[in-house]
């Protein structure tokens, strides 16, 4: 009745439903009408083409940060440093946008590539330490997040500007946004980055499943001893995995830097794009298509939530609780799997 | 007639298969009852039913004549059923006593009464001749000792009926002898034992009766005194099985593998291989005999490039391969059937098909310009599965889902198919049933006859005696004897493996 594949798809779906149900109970508990709340959320995400554009805009970096986490995870690495790699990518794209003067056909790709390279470099370091010295990547990447945050702040304040809190806007030649695509959605901040994100997902799927390099990365992820036995260079694959993961993260930063905002500012705290990427990857079962679907859900919740206070009087913090509940249920997928299997038994 | 355990007409289904179909097992008080069957015949399922891990669809279980429902392992414990698992379930950093009392600690107020527990463990250990130090840490004691701790765990919980799940698979010949004595002591004290195994010699040696199951069906129960290994084997497999693999005399040719003055240290910097010399020629099987831990594993890891040599040379067909990386070694014509097939031999979460090209995925015809060609990969995998009789639902099934014997056949198919000059087979039949062992032995001899050099590492003296054209005994990192199997016997080998040299063996 239930194949394994179906169970694997059911688990995230049930997690999401349970999360939404819990969110409804919490709204009820605090005296709000959950139906109005969720209607407002829906309106806020899909109500008109402007909101829809904003939702897609929010989905874009989530796809990339989700891919970053998922890619590393498929090679058996837990990249908690996506956040820092996002910040470095963001900074690099804006910096190239401001420092270089060139026609768009050169300038824009250059800014995007710079973001990928910056993220990749930020991923290379923990990869190298893990491969050569066995330093655990979780510790290193967490710490590098802070290094990235404060390095970016210092560069914005002291190098790119003269003590100001944000950079100039990047010129049109380095911008992913376009009048035309924006006008389609009543001048939302939707930009061409969505195409880059979808393309990146295709690249990840293709690379992991169709190339010999992907074969090695997956083998190392499942069993390092067998990979070594089979003649693969485990260390090199670990470094490569972190570099590619970092590049995805760096691109996520470019989506914000030269897509949504067009500048980099001194940040008081993390962007959370990287950390949310962990949840996106988890919900998407570390598969390219799953990450896209999970990113759509997270983008929808994030943007739709903005409408909940005005639309239904529900505080937007509640949406964060709903998201947290969904992650909770995904993380406890063992419980749901157990329940499905039990149903399966009794159904027979 | 008094039975302590009766499992009557047990049926257990899993999605798609019937694991146990109408199996009856009756164990008398004070007997050692063997449960014999091939890998995947349903032995473990039946025992898990008895131990309360599975619920049977049909059939009843009686303990001392009373019908019971074993709903979980705690119920089994209360009924006096204890299981000594094949894979030990011990906490490495705890002491023997702490492991034994885990889950049923004697209390003194709010604290654990460790003194009392230690006394009881010591008492039990003495009663059954286990010789276990209650205060030793698990990580400091040998595998054989760890198994005794598992036995003590069941005794401490008052087990009357002990289930041993393939207990000898991990033991050295000496440890096996001691285990047999322990089992006899248990019987003397009135316990009953169910021994899950597919080693016929052990059944003949220690068991009173034997129940055979084949492909999930009960075949019957026989008195061991009225049967012989040949009959048991054919009951288990369902056809005639030969034990001594037929082979012609070896016709060794040129030297393929040549090792000179090799020294290797392990990760703790202990000298494991010490100035070792060894030659293996084309067309011969050299059996590497020895007690585990005398440097055999390190030697093989060094030849295959998984470990660095400190000094000395290894050459293949006259070309040096010392300290090349594993890929270079493989490409120069070495195949390696690893000792630990789960850790090294397979990526368990990969499909069988991908595992079949684990070393060759980057070569034609499986890849072209860095792109995998799955059509060719799965074509190859299907051919290998066919030729080596790997029983799997398809090439897309994860290797994890296969039984041990089929996993091993898959590895052997992959390694032999590369047409290597040298095949290193480390414990190639570990944990397999006679059918699979026969198949693998035949394959290795076939390869020898094709002119390949075969280096066989085994802890089973039978296998060494049976397969080898030449036996090299390894002790303390050196080859201490090099002889033909017909010039020696198990006693002499045993002594050599224990470190006494030939002169001493002769003096006795």
Image (cartoon, helix red, strand yellow):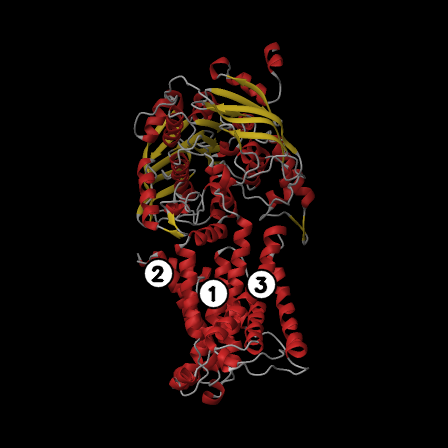
Q: Secondary structure at mark 1?
A: helix
Q: CA distance from mark 1 to mark 2?
A: 22 Å
What residue is pinned by disc 2? Answer: A6
Which one is nearer the viewer's eye here, A333 or B192? Answer: A333
Question: Could you tell me which chain the residue with mark 2 belongs to?
Answer: A
What residue is pinned by disc 1? Answer: A67
Residue B397: % across, % down: 36, 48
Q: Quadrant of the C terminus of chain A?
A: bottom left
Residue B68 seen by the camera: no
Q: CA distance from mark 1 to mark 3?
A: 17 Å
Q: Answer with left or right where residue B299 lies relative to residue B223.
A: right
Say which of marks 2 and 3 sits in front: 3
In the picture as drawn, the residue positioned furthest to the top comes out as B507
Badge 2, how many Cα within 10 Å: few under 14, some, many 20+? few
Question: Could you tell me which chain the residue with mark 3 belongs to?
Answer: A
Residue B30 in the image: above or below residue A134: above
């Amino acid at each position: 009745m239930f194949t394994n594949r179906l169970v694997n798809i059911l688990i995230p779906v049930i997690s999401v439903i349970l999360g939404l149900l819990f969110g409804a109970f919490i709204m009820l508990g605090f005296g709000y009408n959950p139906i109005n709340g969720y209607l407002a959320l829906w309106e806020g995400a899909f109500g008109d083409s402007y909101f829809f554009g904003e939702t897609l805009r929010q989905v874009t970096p989530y796809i990339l940060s989700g891919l970053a986490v998922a890619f590393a995870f498929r090679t058996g690495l837990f990249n908690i440093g996506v956040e820092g790699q996002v910040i470095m990518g963001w900074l690099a794209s804006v910096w190239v946008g401001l420092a270089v003067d060139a026609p768009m056909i050169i300038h824009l790709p250059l800014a995007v590539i710079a973001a990928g390279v910056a993220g990749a470099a930020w991923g290379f370091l923990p990869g190298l330490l893990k491969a050569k010295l066995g330093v655990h990547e979780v510790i290193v990447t967490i710490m590098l997040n802070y290094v990235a945050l404060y390095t970016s702040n210092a560069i914005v304040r002291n190098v790119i500007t003269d003590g100001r809190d944000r950079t100039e806007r990047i010129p049109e030649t380095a911008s992913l946004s376009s009048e035309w695509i924006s006008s389609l959605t009543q001048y939302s901040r939707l930009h061409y980055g969505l195409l880059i994100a979808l393309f990146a997902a295709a690249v990840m799927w293709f690379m992991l499943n169709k190339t010999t390099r992907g074969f090695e990365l997956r083998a190392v992820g499942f069993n390092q001893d067998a990979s070594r036995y089979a003649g693969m260079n485990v260390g090199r694959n670990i470094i490569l995995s972190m570099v590619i993961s970092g590049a995805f993260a760096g691109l996520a930063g470019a989506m914000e830097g030269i897509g949504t905002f067009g500048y980099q500012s001194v940040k008081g705290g993390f962007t959370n794009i990287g950390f949310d990427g962990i949840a996106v990857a988890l919900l998407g079962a570390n598969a390219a298509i799953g990450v896209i679907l999970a990113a759509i859900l997270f983008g929808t919740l994030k943007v739709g939530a903005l409408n909940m206070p005005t639309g239904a009087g529900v505080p937007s913090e509640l949406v964060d609780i709903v998201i947290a509940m969904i992650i909770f249920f995904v993380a406890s997928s063992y419980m749901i799997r157990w329940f499905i299997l039990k149903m399966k038994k009794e159904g027979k | 007639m008094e039975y302590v355990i009766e499992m009557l007409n047990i049926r257990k289904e899993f999605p798609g298969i019937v694991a146990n179909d109408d199996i009856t097992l009756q164990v008398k008080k004070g007997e050692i009852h063997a449960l014999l069957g091939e890998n995947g015949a349903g032995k473990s399922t039946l025992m898990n039913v008895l131990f309360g891990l599975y619920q049977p669809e049909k059939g009843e279980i009686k303990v001392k004549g009373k019908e019971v429902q074993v709903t979980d392992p705690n119920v089994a414990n209360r009924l006096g059923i204890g299981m000594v698992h094949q894979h030990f379930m011990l906490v490495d950093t705890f002491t023997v006593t702490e492991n034994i009392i885990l889950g049923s600690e004697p209390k003194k107020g709010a604290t654990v009464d460790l003194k009392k527990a230690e006394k009881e463990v010591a008492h039990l250990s003495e009663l059954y001749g286990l010789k276990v130090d209650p205060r030793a840490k698990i990580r400091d004691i040998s595998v054989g000792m760890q198994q005794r701790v598992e036995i003590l765990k069941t005794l401490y919980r008052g087990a009357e009926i002990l289930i041993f799940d393939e207990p000898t698979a991990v033991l050295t010949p000496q440890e096996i002898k001691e285990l047999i004595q322990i089992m006899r002591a248990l019987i003397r004290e009135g316990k009953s034992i169910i021994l899950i195994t597919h080693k016929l010699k052990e059944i003949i040696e220690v068991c009173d009766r034997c129940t055979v199951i084949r492909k999930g069906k009960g075949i019957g129960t026989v008195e061991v005194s009225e049967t012989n290994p040949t009959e048991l084997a054919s009951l288990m497999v369902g056809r005639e099985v030969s034990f001594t693999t037929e082979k012609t005399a070896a016709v060794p040719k040129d030297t393929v593998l040549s090792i000179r003055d090799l020294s290797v240290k392990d990760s703790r910097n202990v000298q494991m291989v010490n100035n070792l010399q060894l030659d293996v020629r084309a067309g011969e099987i050299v059996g590497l005999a020895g007690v585990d831990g005398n440097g055999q594993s390190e030697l093989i890891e060094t030849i295959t490039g998984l470990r660095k040599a400190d000094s000395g040379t290894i050459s293949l067909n006259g070309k040096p391969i010392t300290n090349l990386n594993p890929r270079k070694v493989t490409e120069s014509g070495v195949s390696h059937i690893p000792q630990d097939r789960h850790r090294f031999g397979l990526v368990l979460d990969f499909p069988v098909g991908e595992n079949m090209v684990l070393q060759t995925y980057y070569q034609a015809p499986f890849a072209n310009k860095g792109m995998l060609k799955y059509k060719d990969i799965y074509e190859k995998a299907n051919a290998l599965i066919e030729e080596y009789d790997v029983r799997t639902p398809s090439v897309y099934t994860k290797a994890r889902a296969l039984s041990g014997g089929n996993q091993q056949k898959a590895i052997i198919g992959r390694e032999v198919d590369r047409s290597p000059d040298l095949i290193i087979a480390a414990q190639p039949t570990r944990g397999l049933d006679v059918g699979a062992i026969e198949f693998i032995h035949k394959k290795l001899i076939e390869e020898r006859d094709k002119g390949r050099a075969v280096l066989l590492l085994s802890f089973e003296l039978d296998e060494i005696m049976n397969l080898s054209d030449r036996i090299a005994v390894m002790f303390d990192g050196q080859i201490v004897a090099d002889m033909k199997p017909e010039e020696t016997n198990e006693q002499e080998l045993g002594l050599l493996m224990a470190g006494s040299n030939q002169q001493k063996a002769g003096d006795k």
